[in-house]
Structures are given as structure tokens and as C-alpha cells.
Image: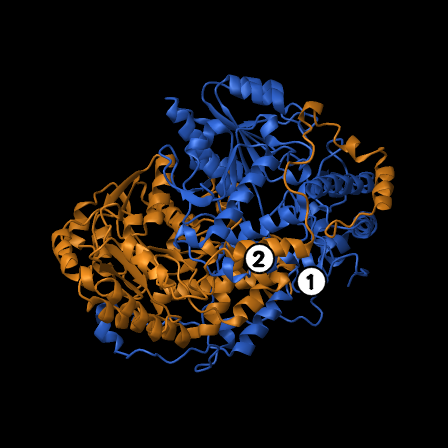
Chain colours: A blue, B orange
């Protein structure tokens, strides 16, 4: 076992000790057990076969589990105890902005006036919901420096796609067919995937030695085929690209548009705005910057903002204010249409709105200042032991390389796994793709200095272990509920659903 | 600032450790002309004040917990057992990230595995994934799978599919340069005429059952029609209905999609809901998004990982099957807990209650002079009724009696002003249905004779929904 001493400043990793495997829920079933209570029918009951022709009826019942309510609750409680979470510890995942999710957000969303309203209720009966959405649109416009926002997209990648649909519609409306989208080699994987989904060819622009977009190469790549340049600023290297206005001028001069991937907005609130940098379209991740919880993979929300010239293309409906009434505006003939059912992940919008009003103007500004301070502090405490591919100052995140440790036979993946033994969730690893053995660390503003110091101590301890007892690191994690899992076997013979043993 | 822990002293210590004078120095790379200063939004509020603001907004909404409602049309007010919220409210679940680091994410991964199993069971198909955003985008993803699988570039879809799902499909197909055939088949599909709309360039046929108007479609025949043209059948389903109605796997569908909202997810004004997708096993490598698989560690302990990641954007970038990254995992957890509680019997009971109440209501409502069923086809939890006056007026009258009426079909198609979709769940009481009928009688007596005239004239002119 390890010599770790997870104190309160580290997190608590679900430990293998006293935490045996949890049987699949189907293995706990006992025919006839019930976990539900329903009222008896209060209307005259007729045989199902009388109401629906038997050819339309199910032949073989779905083999759902049969358990009592206490058994169900215990099963899922046991499963929850096999998870790491923000509430149990530090989660320094770069580009994911795993900050604290305020509890008041979760209270706000349980109000019956938000929880139990139907998307097709008359607008007059949901004025509070529409007002909240309208005010959120306004706040996001102001924070990002844009002219209009749609709250419809369900996630960041969905926002990207919506943005690219609008960009294509804009070009088409000018009789212009454009087939290429440029993104840096440090970009998020969703950028090229979204570009492909709108039928565009992805053109990759290199980063230069300073980790910025290679402006000279960009000049060669931008032309009359360029639909847009997709950029994250600060980049996934955690660096603010000070040439952003030159890039915007270059792209605009060629008739292209600038797309801002808002994954890293947490660095610049109250400091600088994408709209002022020359971006025409942005998406924001409310589940990153605006504290809506990640939920083990979602749901998120990825609102899209635009400058005036792209506003006609926004998805319908938009929330507008008319004669002191809030309305859903459908009459927008140049709109790209709808990108999802209904109006957005409303529950997430309530949480983000609550957070924005809680923090206010100065609060959000302090968020970014503290996020950047914490990240620079962490880097300053680690860059003597781990290689730093690009010089700082960085913004809200930074990238280190495990190259030096690799020479000792220890990979970044091993170091990531060893961090678990010390009670920490690992940083993002092997991303961005342009850094060998990359660690991408984003502490966020909600972690205190003691936690940052405990993380530094663990990273330094691991660096020592790499020198002195590398096996300890390469065989990590030691304390978790399972060890490293056989991923090759999982992919070779996929077992994607439980089946009874025959 | 209660979420921000740094004290002024700690900020100073950190600046010294970094070796800069002030935080502003850390922003030295931001060109000066870009510095914006704090955004022009209101100042911050204490928690107490923010809740007052929230309560003020929430109270401007007329929620459906305090008045009867007959709205469905893709979002339903089902009962959510208390245990569902107790589990999804555990912060070990809701404050965790995507389970990329399997050793510290076994809880979420096992939930996804159990969810995939339940969706496969419900649909009668082989495989599912960790969830998609909603039914509309799930339908788009299934269409893309059909296009890639068949190498054909056209999708056929009936007007019985939810108008919002069709609108979303239109956006994507236009944006991606694929062709869309919309088959105008009001109320219930005729397999022969659907067949005429298909040809050997059709990649997939999309049919919803029960359809948007509530009618159960002849899925087995439609499946044969699709397959006869070499197209895949994509079924759009309501998961609650699948405990009674034949599942996609039994009638030969290749893919099934649907909205998982009825499975323990609040209405919350349209989202977040749950996009479900299930497929035949040979299509597994074309599925979008995350998939959990079972495997073992070195000691032989069972564990779960995200698998078949070679389909996904973070590995394949522009060659990925989809751009989806963040999904709706927490909603999938709610559905998994809901289905675990209801189990084999409970889900059937819920479905039966919906069925019985809808049929009781249909009898009552269609007996009112001037009102008639729009079609003579079997239905499950909702049906469409033809009204002698515009449905908007009916709804307005109902609302004046504090009853939230049905879905006004004029919203989807201008030609269908006199049609209302009424939905029923286990939450609907007999009293509410009786009150609905009595209120409709109050509205209609004086218009009954004039109305039936209009209804007669209107018959046969069914617009495109």
C-alpha cells in the first residue's frame, strides 16, 4: 500500500479497503419484489386487449430488475461511494473548469414554479421562466461582449455546431460557399468534429514555439475558402494569444468569420471580452464557467452568442421582450431553425442565472483573477521538477510535460494514477496533443491555498518516487476500489450490457 | 465572497511565490486596448437575497403541481418517486466529471452500464450508449448512422413524428447537405403510401409510435416497407409505452430513439431531458458518444471503463461518428433509478394507468356534442380531438377555469386550428377528467350545432403538421 496520508486538504478517493464490488442491479433482483407504490385505477378499468390490438402489444416483458425501495437506494448509494466528486476533493482537470457547484443553485431549481412547468404552457403562464432566460441572455451578452444570445444548445459541442450552422448560413446568404474551417493544432477535439459535421474540411494551423498560433502560417492558410477560424483564447495551453486582433483582421479581410470556443472563459471574465477581440460567434459552457454541475458527464448548456450581423441566423425561438411581456419569438425567417427540442436546458439556465446574480459584476471579475492567480502559483511550485514546454505567465490553466519522468520509464498516465493514491483526481492528461506526455492543470478559483499546497506536495513526492521507486508509480493506483482496468479487453470483446449467466 | 477562499494575505503570498507584484502582471499578455473592466451586470447578492429574487421569478409561473393540465406532446407530468431525487441529489454523482479516470469513477460507469442494459431491454434492441441530449438530436444521430451504414444520402420521415424533432432534423440535414423526404401522412401511416415515398437512395425511414397525435402506428408493416427498399427503420418511442406496446426489437427496427423524460425527470420547461438511443449490435461502432463496458483489473475484479473510444471526437477528431462530448449522464441516472424502482411490474402499471385514463377521457370527451376523435386508431396516453371552435379558444376558456388545456395543433401547422392533443398520465385523476369534460360542455353547448357544421366542412382538409 502507499504512504499516502489523505488529509482534509487532499480529497478522498473511494478506497478499495472496505468497499467491495457492487453487484449489478440485475443480480440483486427477486421476482415479485416491489420498489414502487401507485394508486389503484380510479376510472373503470378495461382489459388492455380491448383497447389495443394484440398485434401491437409486447410479447416478451422487459427484464427490468425487481427490488424494494431500500434496496434500490442502498445500491445507488454504494455506487455513489465509488465516485470521486468536487464535493469530495480537488479536481484539477484542465479545460474542464471543475469548480465548486454552489448549493443554492440546486435549491433554486427545485422551486415548483421552475420544476413543474411544461414547455407548451401559454407564455402568459410562464413569464417568470421567460424573464429569467431573457435576463440571462442579457448578462451573457455583456460578459462576452456580444449582441445577442441563444440559450438553446445543450452543451459546448452542440453550441459549436450551432455556431457553424449559422456561419454557413451567413456565407450562403451572401451567395458565398465556403468549405474550410481552420483550427489550431492545440484545439479541442470537438472543433474538428463539429467542422466535419457541417461538411467542411478542417485545416490545421500550427502553434509556434511560444505556444501561440503561427501567424505566418495562418496567413498562408486563410483564403476565399475559409468559412471561419475556430479559436480558444486563452488556448488549451493556458496562454492568451495577444495576436488575436491580427488574426481577426486577417480572417475578416478574407471574408471569413471568427469563432470563439468558450471553454476557457473562466480566465477572462471582467478582464477581456471575446466580442472585443473580434469574434463573431461564441459559445459558452455554463457547466464550466457558470457552476452548473457536470453530473458525471452532463447535462451542460452551451449558449451561443453572436454579433448583430449574424443575429438573424440564430436558432428559433429567441426570448424577447415586447410591451413588458416576455415572449418566444419564432418569426425569424433567416434563422437556421431549431437545433434541439424546446428552448434549452432550462434547469441549467436557472442554476447559471442564480450564480451570476450571486456573484455580480465584481464577483465574476474576482473569479477570473483568482483562477489565474491560483494557476500561476501552482505552476511556480512545480516547474522545477516537471518540464514546462511554454513559458508563463499562464492564464487559468497551464501545461506541464512528463518527458523527464518518461526517461525513467514512468509515463504521465502513471503519475496521474499515482495522484489518486494521494487523494486527488488527476489533471487532464495527453492533451493538448502538441505536448508530449502532457498534464493540463486547472485549479479553478474555488480551491484554497492549503489544497493547492497539498497538491504540490503530492506532485513533488511523486517526482521523488519516479527517481527512487518508479515501480510504485507505474503500478498505481493502489488504494482505489479497482486497479487499472483492461481496456484492450473491453474494446476487443465489448460487454456493453448485463445478461444473465446461462 | 463565500465561494472564493483566498484571503488578501494568501493572495500576497502567492504573488510573492510567483515573483510578480500584482495579479494585473499575470494578465500582461492581454493587449491593453482589450481590457474591458468588470461587466455591466448587477452587483452581487447574498444567498438570501438571490433566493428572494428566484422565488419572485418562480412565483410568476403557473406550475402544474397546483392545477390540472392535459399537456403532453413530448413532455409528460409523471410521478417521480422520492428516491429518484434522493439519488440524483447525491453530490458524489452530480458533482463528478465524465468518467475518463475509471478507477475513481466506478459509480458513474456502473450506472451507465446498468442504464445501457435497461434501455436495451426496454427497446428489445442490443446496445445503447451513455445518453444523448434529447430525442430530437438522438433522431439526428440515428439518421447519420443510417446514412453512413447504407452509403445513401436521404432520410424519409412521416409528419407523425414530433414537429420539433422534424424541425431539428431539417436544420441538421440542410447544414450537412443531406436530403430529407417528408411524408404527409396525417393521423396514422398507410404502409403502402409510405412505401411509395421510399426508393433505393433512402438510407432510413423514421416513424414515431405512438405518433405525435397519439396514434399507434403499424410498425411491423412499416418496418417491412423500409427493409424492402434497403433502408433502416428508425423508431421514435415513448419509454413508458414500451412496457405494454411491442418494442422496436420485436417489429424489426434497426434503431430506436426517444425522450427519456417520462422516466423520473421533471418537466422543468423543456430540459434537461434525456436522449435515448438503441441499436442492433452490428451498428455498435457507429454509435455516437460515450459507451461503458465491463472488464476486469489485474486482480480479476470486475470494473467498468468507457470503451470503443475510437469512435469519439477526443480520439478521432474530424473522423469521429459525432461531435458529442458532454451528454446527459445525470438524466440517465434518474432514468436508471426510476426503472429500478418501478421494475418489471411497476412500469406496466404506470403504462396501464395512462392507458385507462386516456381511454376513459376519450369516451367522455368524444361524447360531448361538437367534439370528435380525429382518428379511429388505437392510442396509448394521448389522443387528438377535433373541436368546433379553434383549439386556441378552447384552451383560453379552460385556462380561465384554471385548467391548462391540451396542445393546440395550430402551433405545429396553420391548417389544423381545430385540433387539440390531450394527454393523460397516472397523475391525472378521474375528478380532473370529469371536470375537463364538464368545462368543455360549459363552453360548447351554444356552439355545438354551428360547430358540428364546421367540423363536417373541415373533415378531409387536414393540413401538414
Secondary structure under the numbered disc 2 in the rendered image: helix
Instruction: Compare residues B404 and B237 and report the one nearer the observer.
Output: B404
Mark 1 falls within which chain? A
Q: Position of residue B7 (x, y in %)?
A: 83, 47
Find disc 2 in the rendering and name its residue: B55
Could one spot residue B119 in this view of the protein? Answer: yes
Q: Position of residue B43 (x, y in %)?
A: 68, 43
Residue B274 vs B86, above or below: the answer is: above
Instruction: Compare residues B159 and B406 and report the one nearer the observer.
Output: B406
Give the total of numbered labels. 2
Identify the residue at image location x=83%, y=48%: A464
Q: Position of residue B397 (x, y in %)?
A: 31, 59
- Packing grade of label 1 (10 A; few <14, some 14-19, many >=20) is many
Whether residue A475 sits left or right of residue B213 in the image: it is right
Q: Position of residue A179 (x, y in %)?
A: 43, 26
The disc placed on residue A76 is: none
Secondary structure under the numbered disc 1 in the rendered image: loop
Residue B349 vs B196, above or below: the answer is: below
Give the quarter of the image for residue A472.
bottom right
Mark 2 falls within which chain? B
Find disc 1 in the rendering and name its residue: A480
Amino acid at each position: 500500500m502507499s504512504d499516502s496520508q489523505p488529509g482534509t486538504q487532499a480529497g478522498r478517493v473511494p478506497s478499495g479497503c472496505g468497499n467491495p464490488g457492487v453487484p449489478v442491479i440485475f443480480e440483486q433482483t427477486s421476482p415479485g419484489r416491489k420498489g414502487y407504490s401507485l394508486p389503484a385505477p380510479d376510472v373503470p378499468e378495461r382489459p388492455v386487449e380491448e383497447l389495443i390490438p394484440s398485434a401491437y402489444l409486447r410479447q416478451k416483458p422487459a427484464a427490468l430488475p425487481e427490488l424494494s425501495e431500500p434496496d434500490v437506494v442502498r445500491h445507488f448509494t454504494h455506487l455513489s461511494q465509488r465516485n470521486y466528486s468536487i464535493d469530495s476533493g480537488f479536481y484539477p482537470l484542465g479545460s474542464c473548469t471543475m469548480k465548486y457547484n454552489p448549493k443554492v443553485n440546486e435549491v433554486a431549481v427545485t422551486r415548483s414554479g421552475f420544476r413543474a412547468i411544461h414547455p407548451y404552457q401559454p407564455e402568459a403562464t410562464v413569464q417568470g421562466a421567460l424573464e429569467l432566460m431573457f435576463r440571462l441572455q442579457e448578462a451573457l451578452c455583456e460578459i462576452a461582449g456580444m449582441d445577442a444570445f441563444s440559450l438553446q444548445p445543450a452543451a459546448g459541442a452542440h453550441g459549436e455546431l450551432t455556431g457553424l450552422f449559422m456561419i454557413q448560413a451567413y456565407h450562403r446568404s451572401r451567395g458565398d460557399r465556403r468549405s474550410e474551417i481552420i483550427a489550431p493544432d492545440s484545439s479541442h477535439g470537438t472543433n474538428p468534429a463539429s467542422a466535419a459535421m457541417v461538411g467542411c474540411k478542417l485545416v490545421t494551423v500550427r502553434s509556434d514555439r511560444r505556444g501561440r498560433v503561427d501567424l505566418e502560417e495562418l496567413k498562408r492558410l486563410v483564403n476565399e475558402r475559409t468559412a471561419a477560424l475556430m479559436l480558444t483564447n486563452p488556448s488549451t495551453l493556458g496562454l492568451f494569444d495577444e495576436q488575436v486582433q491580427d488574426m481577426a483582421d486577417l480572417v475578416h479581410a478574407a471574408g471569413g468569420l471568427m469563432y470563439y470556443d468558450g471553454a476557457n472563459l473562466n480566465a477572462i471574465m471582467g478582464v477581456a471580452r471575446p466580442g472585443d477581440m473580434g469574434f463573431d460567434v461564441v459559445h459558452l459552457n455554463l457547466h464550466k464557467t457558470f457552476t452548473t454541475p457536470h453530473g458525471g458527464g452532463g447535462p451542460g448548456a452551451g449558449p451561443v452568442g453572436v454579433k448583430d450581423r449574424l443575429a438573424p441566423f440564430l436558432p428559433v425561438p429567441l426570448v424577447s421582450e415586447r410591451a413588458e411581456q416576455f415572449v418566444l419569438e419564432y418569426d425569424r425567417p433567416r434563422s437556421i431553425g431549431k437545433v434541439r427540442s424546446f428552448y434549452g436546458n432550462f434547469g441549467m439556465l436557472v442554476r447559471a442565472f442564480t450564480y451570476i446574480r450571486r456573484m455580480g459584476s465584481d464577483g465574476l471579475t474576482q473569479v477570473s483573477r483568482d483562477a489565474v492567480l491560483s494557476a500561476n502559483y501552482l505552476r511556480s511550485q512545480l516547474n522545477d521538477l516537471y518540464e514546462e514546454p511554454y513559458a508563463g505567465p499562464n492564464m487559468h490553466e497551464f501545461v506541464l510535460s512528463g518527458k523527464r519522468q518518461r526517461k525513467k520509464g514512468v509515463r504521465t498516465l502513471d503519475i496521474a494514477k499515482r495522484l489518486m493514491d494521494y487523494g486527488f483526481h488527476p489533471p487532464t492528461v495527453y492533451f493538448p496533443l502538441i505536448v508530449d506526455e502532457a498534464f493540463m492543470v486547472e485549479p479553478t478559483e474555488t480551491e484554497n491555498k492549503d489544497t493547492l499546497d497539498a497538491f504540490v506536495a503530492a506532485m513533488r513526492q511523486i517526482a521523488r518516487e519516479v527517481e527512487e521507486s518508479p515501480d510504485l508509480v507505474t503500478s498505481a493506483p493502489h488504494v482505489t476500489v479497482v486497479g487499472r482496468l483492461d481496456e484492450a479487453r473491453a474494446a476487443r470483446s465489448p460487454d456493453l450490457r448485463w445478461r444473465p449467466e446461462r | 465572497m463565500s465561494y472564493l477562499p483566498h484571503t488578501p494575505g494568501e493572495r500576497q503570498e502567492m504573488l510573492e511565490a510567483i515573483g510578480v507584484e500584482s495579479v494585473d502582471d499575470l494578465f500582461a499578455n492581454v493587449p491593453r486596448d482589450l481590457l474591458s473592466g468588470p461587466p455591466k451586470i448587477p452587483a452581487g447578492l447574498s444567498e438570501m437575497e438571490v433566493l428572494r429574487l428566484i422565488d419572485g421569478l418562480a412565483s410568476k409561473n403557473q406550475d402544474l403541481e397546483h392545477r390540472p393540465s392535459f399537456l403532453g406532446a413530448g413532455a409528460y407530468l409523471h410521478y417521480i418517486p422520492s428516491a429518484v431525487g434522493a439519488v440524483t441529489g447525491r453530490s458524489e454523482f452530480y458533482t463528478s466529471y465524465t468518467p475518463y479516470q475509471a478507477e475513481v469513477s466506478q459509480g458513474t460507469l456502473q450506472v451507465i452500464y446498468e442504464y445501457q442494459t435497461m434501455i436495451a431491454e426496454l427497446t428489445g434492441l442490443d446496445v445503447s450508449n451513455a445518453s444523448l441530449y434529447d430525442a430530437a438530436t438522438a433522431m439526428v444521430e440515428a439518421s447519420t448512422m443510417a446514412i453512413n451504414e447504407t452509403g445513401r444520402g436521404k432520410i424519409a420521415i412521416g409528419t407523425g413524428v414530433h414537429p420539433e424533432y422534424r424541425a431539428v432534423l431539417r436544420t441538421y440535414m440542410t447544414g450537412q447537405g443531406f436530403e430529407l423526404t417528408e411524408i404527409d401522412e396525417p393521423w396514422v401511416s398507410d404502409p403502402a403510401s409510405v412505401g411509395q415515398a421510399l426508393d433505393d437512395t433512402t438510407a432510413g425511414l423514421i416513424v414515431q409510435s405512438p405518433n405525435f397525435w397519439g396514434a399507434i402506428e403499424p410498425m411491423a408493416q412499416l418496418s417491412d416497407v423500409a427493409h424492402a427498399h434497403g433502408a433502416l427503420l428508425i423508431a421514435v418511442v415513448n419509454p413508458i409505452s414500451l412496457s405494454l406496446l411491442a418494442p422496436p426489437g420485436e417489429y424489426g427496427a434497426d434503431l430506436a430513439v426517444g425522450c427519456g423524460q417520462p422516466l423520473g425527470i421533471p418537466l422543468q420547461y423543456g430540459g434537461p431531458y434525456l436522449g435515448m438511443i438503441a441499436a442492433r449490435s452490428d451498428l455498435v461502432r457507429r454509435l455516437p458518444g460515450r459507451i461503458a463496458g465491463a472488464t476486469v483489473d489485474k486482480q480479476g475484479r470486475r470494473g467498468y471503463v468507457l470503451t470503443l473510444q475510437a469512435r469519439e471526437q477526443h480520439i478521432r477528431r474530424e473522423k469521429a461518428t459525432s461531435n458529442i462530448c458532454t451528454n446527459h449522464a445525470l438524466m440517465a441516472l434518474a432514468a436508471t433509478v426510476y426503472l429500478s424502482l418501478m421494475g418489471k411490474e411497476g412500469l406496466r402499471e404506470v403504462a396501464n394507468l395512462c392507458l385507462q385514463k386516456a381511454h376513459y377521457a376519450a369516451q367522455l370527451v368524444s361524447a360531448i356534442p361538437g367534439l370528435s376523435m380525429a382518428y379511429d386508431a388505437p392510442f396509448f396516453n394521448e389522443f387528438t380531438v377535433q373541436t368546433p371552435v379553434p383549439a386556441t379558444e378552447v384552451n383560453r376558456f379552460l385556462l380561465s377555469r384554471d385548467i391548462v388545456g391540451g396542445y393546440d395543433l395550430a402551433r405545429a401547422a396553420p391548417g389544423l386550428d381545430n385540433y387539440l392533443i390531450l394527454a393523460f398520465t397516472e397523475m391525472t385523476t378521474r375528478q380532473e377528467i370529469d371536470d375537463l369534460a364538464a368545462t368543455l360542455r360549459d363552453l360548447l353547448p351554444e356552439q355545438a350545432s354551428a360547430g358540428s357544421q364546421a367540423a363536417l366542412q373541415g373533415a378531409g382538409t387536414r393540413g401538414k403538421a
